[in-house]
Amino acid sequence: MDERDESTEDRESGSLDGMMQHLEEAKKLDKSKSATSGQSWSGLQREVRKHQNVAILSKNYSERLNELVEFDAITHRSSSILRSAEAAFDAHGQLPIYYRTGDTVTHTGIITNLITEPDSDSTEAEDFRKHISQNDTYSDHNDELDKTTYIVRQGMELDDPFPMTELRKVSDSEPIDAGFWRSPAYVFQREGDFSTE
């Protein structure tokens, strides 16, 4: 009986030491997890998450913009991983989008679903495929679901298109430069552009 009590005590003290040892390992694991799960957002990603009135400014072909207005929902893609768009969508559950042709903003919509680096065999990917129009030629030259794939709803052509220089960048609150050629840009919404009234 004494032998059994002694081995039980050894196990208990051993397990306490073991727990303390594992506690330190668990703390290290927790720190490394937090570094990759939202704690590592870049400066711009933090800004688009912080502000409620952010939008993305993108360009697209006129055929795609016609479909944006024609269909209830349309899938658009980018061959780049749009981490800041992903961060904004993650924080706000949607992301307003301005579309420009040249230097003029002509269309708007709301990104209602967004994935980066999609698994083309997943059930989620099927939802994105459902909203690719029959006339869409994107996959003739790129992956069908590219590095960033998103669904846009509430697409509309603006009655009063406006110069993109009226939009201010999230990064520094300065207006978009005339002749800005890259895409996308992260901007603050103009008042009333995406009101739900």
Image (cartoon, rainbow, N blue to C red):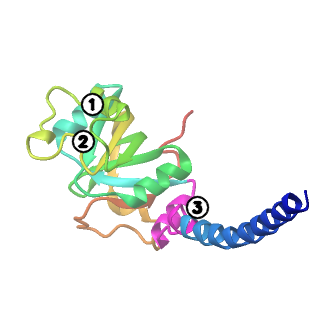
In-front residue for pair 70/8: 8
Q: Which amino acid does label 2 sit on?
A: Leu
Q: Name the residue under label 1.
A: 129
In-front residue for pair 128/159: 128
Residue 9 location in percent, x, y? 85, 64
Q: Which amino acid does label 3 sit on?
A: Lys
Q: Distance between the residues labelled 1 and 3?
A: 31 Å
Mark 2 touching mark 3, by CB under 8 A?
A: no
Residue 64 location in percent, x, y? 21, 38
Q: Mark 3 points at which residue?
A: 50
Quarter of the image with the N terminus in it: bottom right
- Mark 2, other Cα within 10 Å: few <14 / some 14–19 / many ≥20: many
* N-term mark: 1 or 3: 3
Work out whether 141 lies above or below 187: above
Q: Distance between the residues labelled 1 and 2?
A: 8 Å
Quarter where residue 10 is shown: bottom right
Mark 1 touching mark 2, by CB under 8 A?
A: yes
Labelled disc at residue 145:
2
* N-term mark: 2 or 3: 3
Q: Write the residue at 30% across / 53% down.
A: 58
Q: How far apart are marks 2 and 3 (CA)?
A: 29 Å
Point out the stretch of residues depicted in magenta.
Answer: 34-52
Residue 112 location in percent, x, y? 44, 38
Is 176 left, or right, of 138 in this rendering? right
- Mark 3, other Cα within 10 Å: few <14 / some 14–19 / many ≥20: some
Q: Which residue lies furthest to the right in this view?
A: 2
Labelled disc at residue 75:
none
* Magenta span includes 46: yes
> Which circle, 2 or 3, is nearer the viewer?
2
Q: Residue furthest left?
A: 140
Work out whether 72 lies above or below 97: above
Q: Is mark 3 on a helix, strand or loop?
A: helix
